[in-house]
Image (cartoon, rainbow, N blue to C red):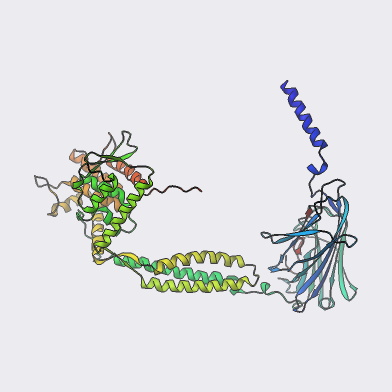
């Protein structure tokens, strides 16, 4: 039964297609031209530039059913780097009666389309006589140096065959007097070099006329003619004249503006680097001042990591909190141990920010994966550390004089580039796109760089530079071999010691861990701590560790989770050549032909 139903459905479908009007399944390009005749009347205007009045007589052979409403003819609006000032004069039929039409411009391909007809269908042979004018239709040959009329007589992108083709090119007396006798004719599909016969010139009403004819031509099978004239016969438009300033001036001056902008950036960077130097001597340091929490230290270290993870570890090793997690160690948490053990007021503010004012020992807070409120509190906390560095005269705001100079140079050059760009837009240059790209890039660079050049930037004060070098000394201590570290500690009277006089290495190393995180030595120092705990035969009390999990591994996961949580941001929704050298399709014109 199912097979019978399917068979009936197929038969009904075929019958429906067969009974549909032909226009429902036909293609509007499925027709041909009985004949295609074109005449070019080429002369010189008052400026000596080549102008052409063109008449195309196209006889379309449409099918004898409702398929087409007219034809579509496309004309290029540019030729060899210049606009041709294309103007459609009229569209008429064989009797000279006006044929309705409309035009459309494809800005991407710079082709003007003429769409003939109305909403009414047309059948059988229909004649369309299209008249239009153009300017600058002759060029200077690159190899010969002669002036040339080099044009595609048929649309190489046509989708229709032509049963008969004929073209005439008539040159006014002043142009005809400059003919060199060099001519060429090519036929076939694009890039074919097959020769055809170009007849003439023949005198006709004071003009010299060339002609070419052929029988049937397949769709896309074109004819291209090339006719030579003495050099200087035709005045070329400015857009075809060499003009390095118009073509490359915007990009060149814009590049200089970008270079000056780079100078501003370099000047700011050099200022910051100079302000980080106090004595230039780095001495290994085994501790950090008690009044310099990671939140403040981060403001002194260029390119330091987000200080929040380091700050929580700092609080943990001082006994104020304990780093914990769920049984599977997947979600980090902190437990309040004793707020009063936080060394400074900023440290206690950090405890309050994490626990939201909770002060009872034992309170547990999980670090949220996605919380804008938590991220805001951590951002505010980080800013407090930066503000404290400035309040303690460790940092200051300063403007680079050299950057300001470079900034003004960059702005001035950008203004010059903008002026050149505006000027070049009036010249109809082929390389205008280069200027557009240059302005987009240069404007972005100049805007950002001006902000950098004219703004004050955070730099270290002399006291801040000393503290910066001290922190580099801590980094040096972290990076030396273990035996060298122990040797250093024996020589320092201030190193914390046990009752037997030996240095409490584990306790000292714990205090340095937050700063190792800021200095990019987290993994290195984590391994050192693992070894120190193992040698001392004890486990850390400030962080919860599962069996077989190292401090280094646990701390890496913890630091990553806290960093992600403290910086969380919700996603928002939301045809040239010498005369006689070329091929089919190497000239101007041609365009497109299709159905409507």
Identify the residue at the far front of this view: 357
Q: Residue furthest left?
A: 500
Left or right side of 343 for 104: right
Q: Left or right of 473: which side holds 574? A: right
Q: Quadrant of residue 382?
A: bottom left
Picture quadrant of residue 245: bottom right
Q: Is residue 575 left or right of residue 125?
A: left
Number of marks in the image? 0
Above-or-below relation of 496 to 239: above
Q: Is residue 113 visible?
A: no
Viewer-proximal residue, 389 or 364? 364
Between residues 130 and 208, which one lies in front from this camera angle? 130
> In percent of the image, x 26 and y 38: which residue is there?
544
- In the displayed structure, 436 sits above or below 573; it is below
Q: Position of residue 480 (x, y in %)?
A: 24, 52
The image shows residue 594 at horizontal and vertical percentages of 78, 54
Residue 112 position by quadrant = bottom right
Residue 396 in percent (x, y) is at 29, 65
Horizontal side of residue 448 vs 431, given as left or right: left
Residue 81 in the image: state x and y as whole percent. Answer: 68, 68
Q: Using the image as rendered, state which of residue 550 and residue 578 is in the foreground.
A: 550
Q: Residue furthest top?
A: 1
The quadrant the N terminus occupies is top right
Residue 275 in view in this figure: yes
């Amino acid at each position: 039964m199912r097979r019978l139903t399917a068979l009936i459905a197929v038969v009904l479908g075929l019958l429906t297609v067969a009974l549909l009007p032909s226009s429902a399944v036909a293609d509007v390009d499925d027709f041909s031209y009985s004949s295609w005749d074109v005449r070019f009347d080429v002369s010189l205007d008052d400026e000596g530039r080549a102008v052409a009045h063109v008449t195309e007589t196209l006889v379309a052979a449409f099918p004898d059913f409702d398929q087409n409403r007219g034809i579509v003819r496309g004309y290029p609006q540019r030729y060899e780097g210049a606009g041709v000032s294309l103007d459609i004069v009229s569209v008429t039929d064989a009797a000279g009666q006006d044929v309705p039409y409309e035009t459309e411009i494809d800005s991407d391909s710079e082709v003007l389309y003429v769409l003939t007809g109305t909403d009414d269908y047309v059948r059988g042979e229909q004649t369309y006589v299209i008249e239009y004018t153009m300017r600058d239709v002759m060029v200077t040959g690159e190899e010969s140096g002669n002036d040339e009329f080099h044009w595609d007589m048929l649309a190489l992108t046509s989708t229709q065959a032509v049963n008969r083709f004929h073209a005439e090119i008539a040159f006014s007396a002043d142009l005809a007097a400059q003919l060199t006798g060099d001519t060429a004719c090519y036929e076939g599909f694009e890039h074919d070099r097959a020769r055809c016969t170009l007849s003439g010139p023949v005198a006709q009403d004071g003009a010299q006329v060339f002609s070419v004819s052929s029988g049937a031509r397949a769709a896309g099978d074109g004819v291209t003619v090339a006719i030579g004239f003495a050099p200087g016969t035709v005045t070329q438009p400015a857009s075809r004249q060499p003009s390095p300033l118009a073509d490359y001036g915007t990009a060149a001056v814009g590049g200089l503006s970008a270079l000056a902008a780079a100078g501003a950036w370099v000047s700011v960077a050099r200022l910051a680097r100079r302000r980080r130097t106090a004595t230039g001597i780095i001495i290994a340091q085994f501790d950090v001042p008690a009044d310099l929490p990671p939140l403040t230290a981060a403001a002194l270290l260029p390119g330091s990591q987000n200080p929040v993870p380091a700050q929580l570890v700092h609080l943990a090793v001082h006994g104020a909190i304990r780093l914990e997690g769920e049984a599977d160690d997947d979600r980090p948490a902190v437990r309040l141990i004793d707020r009063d053990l936080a060394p400074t007021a900023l440290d206690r503010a950090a405890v309050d920010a994490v626990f939201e004012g909770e002060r009872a020992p034992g309170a547990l807070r999980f670090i949220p994966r996605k919380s804008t409120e938590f991220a805001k509190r951590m951002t505010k906390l980080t800013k407090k550390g930066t503000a404290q560095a400035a309040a303690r005269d460790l940092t200051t705001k300063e403007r680079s004089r050299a950057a300001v100079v470079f900034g003004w140079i960059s702005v001035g050059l950008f203004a010059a580039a903008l002026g050149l760009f505006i000027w070049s837009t009036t010249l109809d240059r082929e390389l205008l796109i280069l200027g557009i790209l240059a302005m987009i890039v240069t404007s972005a660079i100049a805007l950002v760089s001006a902000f950098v050049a004219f703004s004050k930037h955070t730099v270290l004060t002399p006291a801040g530079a000393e503290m910066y070098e001290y922190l580099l000394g801590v980094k040096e201590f972290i990076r030396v071999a273990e035996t060298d570290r122990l040797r250093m500690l024996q020589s320092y009277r201030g190193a914390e010691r046990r009752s037997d006089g030996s240095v409490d290495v584990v306790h000292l190393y714990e205090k340095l861990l937050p700063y190792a995180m800021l200095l990019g030595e987290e993994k290195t120092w984590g391994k050192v701590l693992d070894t120190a705990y193992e040698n001392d035969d004890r486990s850390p009390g400030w962080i919860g560790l599962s069996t077989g999990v190292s401090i280094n591994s646990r701390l890496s996961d913890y630091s990553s989770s806290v960093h992600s949580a403290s910086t969380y941001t919700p996603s928002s929704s939301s045809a040239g050549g010498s005369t006689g050298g070329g091929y089919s399709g190497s000239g101007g014109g041609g365009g497109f032909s299709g159905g409507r």
